[in-house]
Image (spheres, rainbow, N blue to C red):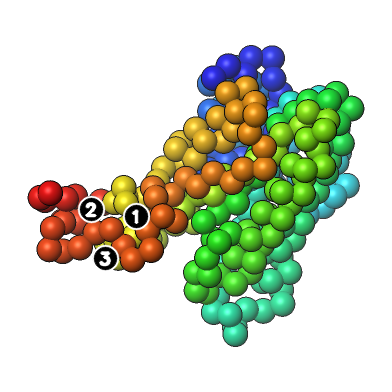
């Protein structure tokens, strides 16, 4: 896919999936801006990639607007910034709830509204949201995360509906278990992976570049007639109700499930 001459903003782009997305757009010829909080060192991450960086917290509307003003004309905006805290429902503090919703939901609202306002003037643009398979399920100990990601589908559908008449497409990707800093503990435990991957038809977890590829597709002209879509990038997890793999016919090699016989 060719993004030559396009200007792309990736929030939360200093590491993990966001960094892979930024790298993907750069490889495809785009001018890329990474927006992130100062603790994530977006200027350093951008310099290593050959991108541009700007410190901005998506929960701070004025700072985010100033960052977009610095970027200038935006052709593609990727609302990737997000956080997660694993806490049981009855032990989730108001502080954890408020901060999670502020970053994952309100921060995306700010990003869509600011980016959409600029795109509306030019009657073109593409916005991609990072939702989750947790937009649909109730994984335990993630009440704030789950609620915020479910809320993104409301933003997705409303924004696609209202911005479509101005030539602006709005889509989302819904990653499953992807190897990132947040999931490092899970990926380091074969026992955890064996249980989790039983319910993934492809038998393994995903990599950030695989999510990035889906984002680039949705942002590209190859998806010119796609808007309001939520694309799972989960190895088939959402299609598996009772699990795909079992010990009678399959083997877990420490990283993925393998079928021994047909």
Which of these two is toward me, 242 or 255?
Answer: 242
Horizontal arrangement in the rendering, residue 7 relative to residue 138 (left or right): right
Q: Which residue is mark 3?
A: 191
Q: Position of residue 158 (x, y in %)?
A: 77, 49
**Residue at position x 58%, y 23% in the image:** 222
CA gap between label 2 and label 3 equals: 12 Å
**Residue at position x 71%, y 63% in the image:** 101
Q: Position of residue 2 (x, y in %)?
A: 58, 16
Q: Secondary structure at mark 3?
A: helix
Q: Quadrant of the N terminus?
A: top right
Crowding around mark 1 (Cα neighbors within 10 Å: few <14, some 14 to 19, many 20+) is many
Q: Find residue 200 and name its label.
A: 1
Q: Find residue 65 and name its label.
A: none
Decide which of tag 2 and tag 3 comes sooner along the chain: 3
Rendering quarter of residue 145: bottom right
Q: Is residue 62 visible?
A: yes
CA gap between label 1 and label 3 equals: 15 Å
**Residue at position x 52%, y 65% in the image:** 137
Residue 179 against residue 4 in the figure, above or below: below
Crowding around mark 3 (Cα neighbors within 10 Å: few <14, some 14 to 19, many 20+) is few
């Amino acid at each position: 896919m060719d993004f030559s001459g396009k200007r792309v903003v990736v929030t939360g782009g200093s590491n993990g999936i966001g960094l892979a997305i930024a790298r993907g757009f750069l490889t495809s010829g785009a001018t890329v801006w990474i927006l992130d909080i100062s603790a994530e060192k977006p200027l350093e991450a951008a310099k290593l990639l050959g991108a541009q960086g700007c410190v901005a917290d998506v929960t701070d509307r004025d700072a985010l607007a100033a960052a977009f003003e610095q970027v200038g004309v935006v052709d593609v905006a990727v609302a990737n910034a997000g956080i997660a805290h694993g806490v049981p429902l009855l032990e989730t503090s108001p502080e954890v709830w408020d901060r999670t919703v502020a970053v994952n939901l309100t921060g995306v609202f700010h990003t869509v509204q600011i980016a959409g306002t600029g795109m509306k003037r030019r009657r073109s643009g593409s916005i991609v949201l990072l939702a989750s398979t947790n937009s649909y399920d109730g994984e335990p100990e993630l009440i704030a995360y789950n609620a915020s990601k479910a809320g993104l589908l409301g933003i997705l559908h409303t924004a696609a509906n209202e911005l479509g008449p101005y030539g602006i497409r709005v889509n989302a990707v819904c990653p499953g278990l992807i190897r990132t800093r947040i999931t490092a503990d899970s990926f380091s435990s074969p026992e955890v992976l064996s249980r989790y991957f039983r319910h993934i038809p492809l038998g393994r977890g995903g990599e950030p570049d695989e999510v990035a590829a889906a984002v680039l597709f949705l942002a590209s002209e190859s998806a010119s007639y796609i808007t309001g879509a939520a694309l799972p990038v989960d190895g088939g997890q959402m299609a598996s109700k009772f699990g795909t793999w079992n010990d009678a016919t399959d083997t877990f090699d420490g990283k993925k499930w393998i079928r021994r016989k047909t």
